Image (spheres, rainbow, N blue to C red):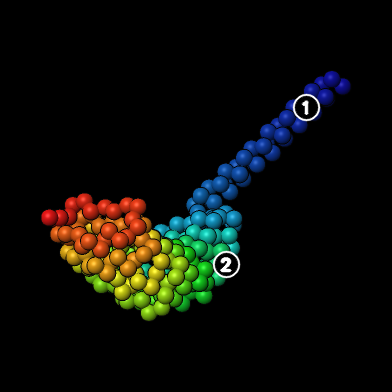
Amino acid sequence: MRTILKSLKSTVLVFVLFVLTISLVLSLNRSTQRTASSDTIYIPEKTTRLVLNLNEKRPAEPSIKELTSLEFLEIVGTDSDDTKSLATLLAEAETLPRLKTFGLTDFNSTEIPLELWTLKNSLNIEHLRLNSNGLQETPKEIFGFRNLRILDLSNNKIQTISAAETKLPFLKEVYLSHNELTEIPLDFLKNTSVSVLDLSSNKINNLPIQVSELASLRKLNLSDNQIPYLPDQVGKLDLEELNLRFNPLK
């Protein structure tokens, strides 16, 4: 009897070891398959901030349009000219109900894709980032973003800025540093309530007296330009900060 029990225990032990070995092999096999097929970017459904690189060819799961908690979306081109993929992403982004900040950056293009200007949720956008592209002028379609509060067009090649076709009454911050502007875009700014204006590192060579009409302006950065003097009217502005470093002031 004792011999039989001992033999039975040995048999059970061998069986258990066999099962564990098979389980381990299957687990490793699944893991290997998952690693080998990791062609999908998995995004948590409750994500509120997302930065996507257009050169990343893997599909996202779930799709962008299903990320209904998303408030910040930036698509980075890194010199990409893949307009088809961009158009697809923009089509998905227009259904996001909570999206407040939207950005297209680092694109090797002088124009912004038309799909951006037809976003159905454009009135929800408060912060628009179009910095570090190849833009030579500001797209007039910006005025469709009626609730815009922050506009970032820095690090482009902008030489002229379209005059405001309609008011952007909520626009408070405008960033236009590192462009090729030769004058302050007053026609654009006069229909805003801008309080922060960054025009540093441009080619501005004159500060017109009309700048005093920007009554809500509190912070003005004109560093690294070509301004030779300040008109007396600047003193009428209720500025908290004025940066004029690296100008040939006399």
Q: Residue at x 20, y 67 (%)?
A: 182
Residue 232 image position (x, y, % from top left):
22, 61
Residue 179 image position (x, y, % from top left):
25, 63
Tag 1 residue = 9
Front tag of 1 and 2? 2
Which is nearer the eye, 200 or 95?
200
On screen, residue 59 above or below 11: below
On screen, residue 218 above or below 114: above
Q: Residue at x 80, y 28 (%)?
A: 8
Q: Secondary structure at mark 1?
A: helix
**Which callout, 1 or 2, points at the residue further toward the start of the chain?**
1
**Amino acid on which the number 2 mark rests in the picture:** Pro
**Amino acid on which the number 1 mark rests in the picture:** Lys
Tell me, yes or no, if residue 224 can be seen here. yes
Residue 171 image position (x, y, % from top left):
42, 66
Which is nearer the eye, 62 or 73?
73
Q: Quadrant of the N terminus?
A: top right
